[in-house]
């Protein structure tokens, strides 16, 4: 019997129909086509990607790899061992994911039943809300205060039996600030599972991983996308209590991390000094960029410990500023969120890229 589209649609979970997807940035080739700008003139500072790319050893390893027709190691044993030495935890507590996004998905699948909640602290990474929706979970928000610090008393007042996971991003995206150990411990002491997303940790030099030895309700998600330049290969990992890691290994897809990603992880650790030197350069450029942005009259940049800078527009029209930059092939991150509509986020580029951006902003300043 032939099934109609209408009949199929009636079987889809109703709660998924109105899910708001995470809005990603456009790839550069699509941007080039849409704006009629040559690809090599696009300056893409909108996705917090590493402007230096991956290690040359990654490119070499992938070109020489000869077993793409063979399934990858489902438990990623070699990668877990390498990460173990890097972060100082037992490999049995590490689970690899198709980017840290998959680790986030797995955590929600592990803890969230239909009708349960996660607690997030906006403004923050938009993916958490769309991810938990696939579990028929809901989102409880406690807004950040001051210069985007956590409202710990506010969080504590909102905890109840249906809140299964508190999600904290450190450094936070898009605001760039880190959670303090004191605030994190206050949340961990509640006994609620706390997921800390450390996608940008290498740029801050701060991590809560040592606390995982004391708090089994602390889960840390990390990625190779930013510091190691592997965003296109999708390689991330989570650090769990040992028993939780064993359960996650049971529920994850069997071949979730490709042979290419696992080969890239190995090659990255073989060139760790090179990559960490690039991190130092990006951090130095971030601090230089912050200083120069403070000199531009219509911008108020916030302090950052990540590889990006959030700026508030204090004068003029954001739409006009955006149009002026895009006409010159410069693309930043903008937001529909009411709390961020007067803000733009700048990913830190190379010195030459940052100088090009600054020249354009100074030209725009004359007409704002």
Image (cartoon, grey):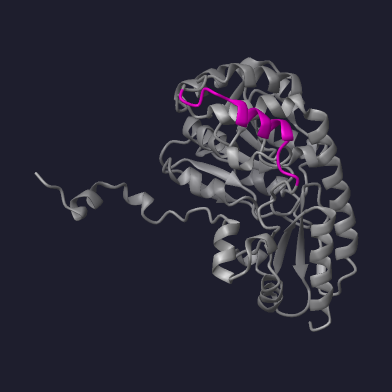
Q: What residue lies at 25% left-to-right and 52% top-to-bottom?
A: 9
The quadrant in which residue 331 appears is bottom right
Q: Is residue 113 magenta?
A: no
Tell me how many marks there are: 0
Q: Quadrant of residue 216?
A: top right
Q: The C terminus is located in which quarter?
A: bottom right
Looking at the image, the residue that sits furthest to the left is 1
- Residue that appears at 78% across and 58% down: 146
- Which quadrant, please, contains the N terminus? top left
Instruction: Find residue 237 and report its horizontal and vertical position in percent.
Output: 62, 30
Kindly identify the residue that appears in the image at 50 percent across and 44 percent down: 131
Q: Is residue 54 magenta?
A: yes
Left or right of 65: which side holds 1? left
Position of 24 with respect to 346 (left or right) is: left
Residue 244 versus residue 249: which sits nearer the camera? 249
Q: Residue at x 60, y 34 (%)?
A: 235
User: Where is residue 261, by image quadrant?
Assistant: top right
Tell me if I can see residue 61 in this picture.
yes
The stretch of residues the image draws in magenta is: 52-69
| Residue 352, horizontal then vertical, whole percent | 83, 58
């Amino acid at each position: 019997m032939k099934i109609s589209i209408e009949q199929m649609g009636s079987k889809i979970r109703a709660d998924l129909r109105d899910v708001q997807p995470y809005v990603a940035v456009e790839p550069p080739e699509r941007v080039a086509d849409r704006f009629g700008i040559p690809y090599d003139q696009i300056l893409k500072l909108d996705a917090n990607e590493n402007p230096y790319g991956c290690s040359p050893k990654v490119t070499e390893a992938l070109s020489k790899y000869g077993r793409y027709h063979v399934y990858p190691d489902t438990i990623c044993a070699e990668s877990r061992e390498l990460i173990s030495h890097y972060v100082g935890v037992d490999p049995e507590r590490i689970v690899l994911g198709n980017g840290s996004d998959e680790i986030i998905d797995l955590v929600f699948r592990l803890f969230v039943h239909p009708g349960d909640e996660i607690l997030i602290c906006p403004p923050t990474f938009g993916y958490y809300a769309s991810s938990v929706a696939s579990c028929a979970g809901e989102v409880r928000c406690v807004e950040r205060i001051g210069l985007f610090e956590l409202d710990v008393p506010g969080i504590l007042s909102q905890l109840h039996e249906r809140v299964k996971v508190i999600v904290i991003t450190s450094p936070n995206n898009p605001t760039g600030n880190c959670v303090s150990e004191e605030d994190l411990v206050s949340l961990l002491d509640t006994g609620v599972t706390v997921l800390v997303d450390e996608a940008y940790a290498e740029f801050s030099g701060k991590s809560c991983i040592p606390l995982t030895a004391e708090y089994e309700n602390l889960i840390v998600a990390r990625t190779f996308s930013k510091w190691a330049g592997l965003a296109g290969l999708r390689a991330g990992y989570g650090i769990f209590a040992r028993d939780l890691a064993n359960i996650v290994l049971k529920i994850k897809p069997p071949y979730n991390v490709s042979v290419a990603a696992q080969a890239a992880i190995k090659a990255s650790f073989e060139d760790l000094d090179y990559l960490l030197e690039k991190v130092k350069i990006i951090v130095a450029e971030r601090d230089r960029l912050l200083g120069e942005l403070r000199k531009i009259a219509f911008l108020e940049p916030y302090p950052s410990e990540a590889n990006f800078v959030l700026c508030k527009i204090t004068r003029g029209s954001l739409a006009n500023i955006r149009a002026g930059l895009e006409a010159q092939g410069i693309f930043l991150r903008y937001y529909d969120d009411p709390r961020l509509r007067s803000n733009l986020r700048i990913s830190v580029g190379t010195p030459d890229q940052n100088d090009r951006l600054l020249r354009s902003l100074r030209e725009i300043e004359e007409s704002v």
